[in-house]
Image (spheres, rainbow, N blue to C red):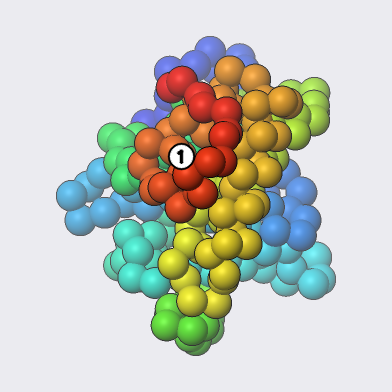
Amino acid sequence: MTEFSEPTDDPSEQHEPPADWPVAITGVTESIVATRGPNERWNMAALGLKAPPEETDPVTARTWGRTRTWRNFTERGSGVVQFTADPREFVDAAVTIREEDSPVLPGADAWVEIEVTRTDSGTQGDTNWVEWTLRPVSATVRRERIPTINRGFGAVIDATVAVSRLDVEAYPTDMLVDRLVYFAETVDKCGGPNERAAFATLDAVTDWRERLPADKQLPTFDQ
């Protein structure tokens, strides 16, 4: 595993548990994965972590298409999975090309160095997918939070999924646009400044609003 420098936080706020996941992986847990590319920089991408059917089984994840994550997993066999509650970082990872000198984002509460192994592959529609098993090598917890529920945050995460499926034949465009309308309205009503800024980025880098009827009025957000 390639070594990297941790962010310069107060060391008293960090501790290193055993090489295991620092959070419970249930259902599909959303994360951001950093993978090192041929330019030696770290690419950020959204990655859904699928919980294993048995506790002794490994966590798995799928990459779709010939993405930077797919390439870097293939060539490096490793990455850094991080957990963050900052919706802006999720949107950047999901819908923009973000490369950093460090694999750990400022908003990460915890991260895990992983080794990956390709275990399966297939095709859905016109898109190839690869399934990977993820094995934790080392884990760091920077800070722990009291959990809160913000519907705006959930709407932002779901919106990144809907946007990624636009123009995919298996998903009707009208249905996806209707979902994005609902997510935008939810962020307007329930989101805070970070959720609004995240949705503004989503609007800026995608063309989903251009698919709306001309008379449709929706809230807009400032970055």
Three-letter code, disc 1: Leu
- Image coords of residue 168 (percent x, y): 47, 71
In front of the other: 16 or 94:
94
Residue at (26, 54) in percent of width and height: 37
- Image coords of residue 97 (percent x, y): 32, 45
In front of the other: 102 or 221:
221
Residue bearing mark 1? 202
In front of the other: 168 or 38:
168
Instruction: Give the side of residue 32 with respect to residue 175, left or right.
Output: left
Q: Is residue 175 above or below residue 12?
A: below
Q: Quadrant of the C terminus?
A: top left
Instruction: Give the side of residue 204 with respect to residue 143, left or right.
Output: left
Helix, strand or loop at label 1? It is helix
The crowding category of the residue bearing disc 1, from other C-alpha atoms within 10 Å (few below 14, some 14 to 19, many at least 20), is many
In front of the other: 171 or 31:
171
Q: Is residue 21 above or below residue 62?
A: above
Residue at (38, 36) in percent of width and height: 204
- Image coords of residue 79 (percent x, y): 43, 53
Instruction: Answer yes or no: is residue 137 visible.
Output: no
